[in-house]
Image (cartoon, coloured by chain):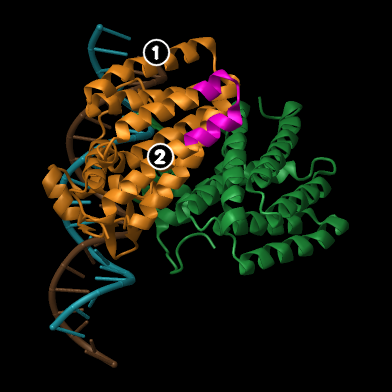
Chain colours: A green, B orange, C cyan, D brown
Amino acid sequence: MTENGAARALLSDQIRNRLTDEIASGALAPGSALDEQQLAARFGASRTPVREALRQLAATGLVEVRPRRGVTVAQMTPQRVMDMFETMAEIEAACVRLATYRITPLERSRLLDLHEASKSLVARGDVDAYDGFNQDFHETIYRATHNAFMTELALTLRARLHAFRRTQLRQGDRVVRSYDEHDAVLVAIAQGDGDAAARLMRAHMLNASAAFGRFIAGSALD
Amino acid sequence: MTENGAARALLSDQIRNRLTDEIASGALAPGSALDEQQLAARFGASRTPVREALRQLAATGLVEVRPRRGVTVAQMTPQRVMDMFETMAEIEAACVRLATYRITPLERSRLLDLHEASKSLVARGDVDAYDGFNQDFHETIYRATHNAFMTELALTLRARLHAFRRTQLRQGDRVVRSYDEHDAVLVAIAQGDGDAAARLMRAHMLNASAAFGRFIAGSALD
DNA sequence: GATGATTTGTACGTATGTATA
DNA sequence: ATATACATACGTACAAATCAT
């Protein structure tokens, strides 16, 4: 569940989504030029929807537009990615703190169910399935803030970091530790200790970030 | 200092900026339709740059695009504005916590200078000038996080809330209390107590939010 | 430093889809 | 329910600027 219920079918949106995926997956390398005509040809469309897609991507920071000099994929230096992870950690911490004070019994029940269900996936070592539950787990917490704006902000940022998180879960026993950290957060929520929940969540996210950092340390980036 | 040093002169950017101002100032009421042709005529341009400007605004959430049904100014319900203020408060809190641990002597010196300078403005009751220093004060803290992404996020959100903050500073003795709250935050920073600084900053921002809430309670909105 | 090629920025026409009578 | 009106979405053409020779 992203944002709008009704189905949309705009070419510019389709192109935007495909470009987002390609940038996030690294298929389009940072710094590489995005030629409007080439893209139009590749997507079998005209330049107009391509331009609109690029403008939308620029607004979310995925590409950089230099007037009359073309569009390039934004430079995602390791430093910048780490900055984004840290920011995400802070926002997650803020979310869980608010959620602790505002979560409804129904939402809490759903959160516990998700956590319980993910247990077996950890045992099985099913990283992909765990990633799905992990996504739901965090989104449920965002919504429990009962702050629609904060929820949207967290979802947007999480989407932007998605490509980098994928690699991270496969580092060592990260899945098992992730589960344990979720558990600790849930205990703090149950005790109504928002500050503790925030602290634990921040640590949880920074651990994920560190796992990513170890990954890029001896790898492609930088 | 916003973002790019080189001069830009794209029609779509000019139009976007003007529309942003008009929406923020309320000249364009929430929910009102934005007709491409009308806007094009008004700005003396064609529909193309207008469309691009609208797409950029949609990406930042200022307008809502419903495919083939036109563009409308996003509904800024009082609830949504309050949600944005709360989110801003959390981000400011996160910033000042990080800044406490990372601020350089030079940055700290600048922060103290700004605070000291604003003292006389408070005494004089010069709200507009104080607002300027206030802006610098907060921006200096953002930058002291030494997290470029978080700094951009905070600046963007602050810009979006700017229109609503203006009214807030004129409520009662808000300026005096704002100064005192800044003072408390600085003491916490000086003591290296990031958590306390965050708590105080959150309270500071929520006070501003509450001032706004009192304003709209018996007023135009809602 | 000037000139040509390429690419972006802008304008406008047409068709499709939505809303209204 | 059908048709009409209207605004948007997309395509294409032209203008202007950048960069390569």
Identify the magenta region.
B187-201
Question: Going 54% across and 55% down the picture, which residue do you hit?
Answer: A145
Residue B191 part of the magenta-drawn span: yes
Q: Is residue A164 magenta?
A: no
Kindly identify the residue that appears in the image at 37 percent across and 27 percent down: B179
Density class for disc 2 (Cα within 10 Å; few <14, some 14-19, many ≥20) is some
Q: Position of residue C9 (x, y in %)?
A: 27, 36
Q: Is residue A188 above or below residue B136?
A: below
The circle drawn on residue B157 is 2
Element type at marker 1? helix
Q: Which mark is residue A95?
A: none
Classify the position of the N terminus of chain A by image quarter: bottom right
- Say what amino acid the circle numbered 1 marks: Asp
Q: Residue furthest right?
A: A123
Q: Secondary structure at mark 2?
A: helix
At a point 28% along the width and 55% down the height, the residue shown is B217
In the rendered image, the vertical position of residue B180 relative to residue B75, given as above or below: above
Residue at which label 1 appears: B113
Question: Residue B103, located in which quarter of the rendered image?
Answer: top right
* Cα distance between the residues tagged 2 and 1: 25 Å
Q: Position of residue B28 (x, y in %)?
A: 20, 51
Mark 2–mark 1 contact, CB under 8 Å?
no
Quadrant placement of the C terminus of chain A: top right
Point out the tag, 2 or 1, that comes first from the N-terminus: 1
**Would residue A62 be visible to someone looking at this image?**
no
